[in-house]
Amino acid sequence: MGHNIEVRDGKHQFAYVGEDTWHGLGKRVPAGLSPDQFLKECGLDWRVEKRPGYTTNRKGEMIPTGKSALVRDIDDAVLDDGLTGGWQPFQNEDWFDIFHEFVERGELEMHSGGSLKGGRSVFGLAKSKEGFELFNGRDVYESYWLFHNPHMKGYSGNARHTSTRVVCDNTLQEALSGSSVAAIAIWHNQKFDPEIIAEMIRREHQRNVELKAKAEFLISKRYAKEDIVDYFKAVFDLEDAKPNKDGSERVVPTMQKLLKAVDEQPGAELGEGSYYQLFNAATYAVDHVIGKTSESRLANSWFGNGTNTKNKALSFALDMAG
């Protein structure tokens, strides 16, 4: 299935708070649940363990391969194999535990979580109380902390801050200092240390204050018409046009979509003609325009190159506006 949400015992292993999701799947749960309660509602209250791998020789004898398989305890599902001795699994409950102190203090609220790709990719999302408004409340930004716990070799566990512009429901990953982002990756040959992630969350309380100041700066700066193409070329590494056989030029399809997004993005009238409008057109395009499917765009936005593109979108907007 395109959404990649795991189905186990006929149920989608996904839970969320608030409005129905774009795919209409999973279980809506009440707000205010503890991380432990949310873990169970998402269907993620299971553990993984390494089990030694074997092969059979000609005599039918079991011979250890020296590598292991990653097995889920509730159904003996093999999530990955060929694991070496230094690879260590991270448990779902350990990631959810990170949110405990912040939920108890009322700083975060559990928002969504689930299992993708048959349990090989697990995520959780907590909403922060630190948001802000622009244009007298017509444009609202919400703040979240996201973790990704892949039960697969070759992938790191990671936690990061992400924001959503509610007016168009697109996720943007802001760069606050050069190309930096509040994110931590923990590889499976490292010790899992939840305190490092918790400290990052504590340290980043000023992120939305800084983002608001940058948004207000972009609102105050107007772009010239000829700047639009240059901006998108820089952010998306694009050519604006390609030659036809007859020598004429045609605008590349991605550029066409981006140019349309400037005026057609939800909330385009907010900050119209400003670099704020261009910046939001770029982040909106990453989440809703560029890519084959909605779920591929979401995965790219959270875990893929979409994050880097959004960093560039803010960086170039600030540079060009300045």
Image: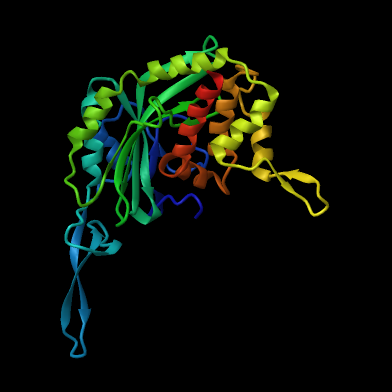
Q: Can you tell which quarter of the image residue 147 is in? A: top left
Q: Residue at x 18, y 43 (%)?
A: 192
In this image, 273 relative to 74: left or right? right
Question: Residue 113's spot in the image, x, y percent?
Answer: 36, 40
Q: Can you tell which quarter of the image residue 29 is in? A: top left
Q: Residue at x 21, y 82 (%)?
A: 56
Q: Is residue 20 visible?
A: no
Q: How many marks?
A: 0
Q: Residue at x 63, y 23 (%)?
A: 268
- As displayed, is residue 97 above or below residue 275? below
- As displayed, is residue 58 above or below residue 107? below
Query: As rendered, which of 11 and 84 lies closer to the eye?
Result: 84
Question: Residue 300's spot in the image, x, y percent?
Answer: 47, 44
In this image, 71 relative to 129: left or right? left
Furthest toward the top, the residue is: 136
Furthest toward the bottom, the residue is: 59
Q: Can you tell which quarter of the image residue 279 is in? A: top right
Q: Is residue 120 visible?
A: yes
- As displayed, is residue 17 above or below residue 11? above
Query: As rendered, which of 55 and 318 lies closer to the eye?
Result: 318
The way the protein has been coloured in the rendering is rainbow
Question: Residue 201's spot in the image, x, y percent?
Answer: 27, 27
In this image, 44 relative to 313: left or right? left
Furthest toward the front, the residue is: 247
Question: Residue 316's spot in the image, x, y percent?
Answer: 52, 28
In this image, 135 relative to 34: left or right? right
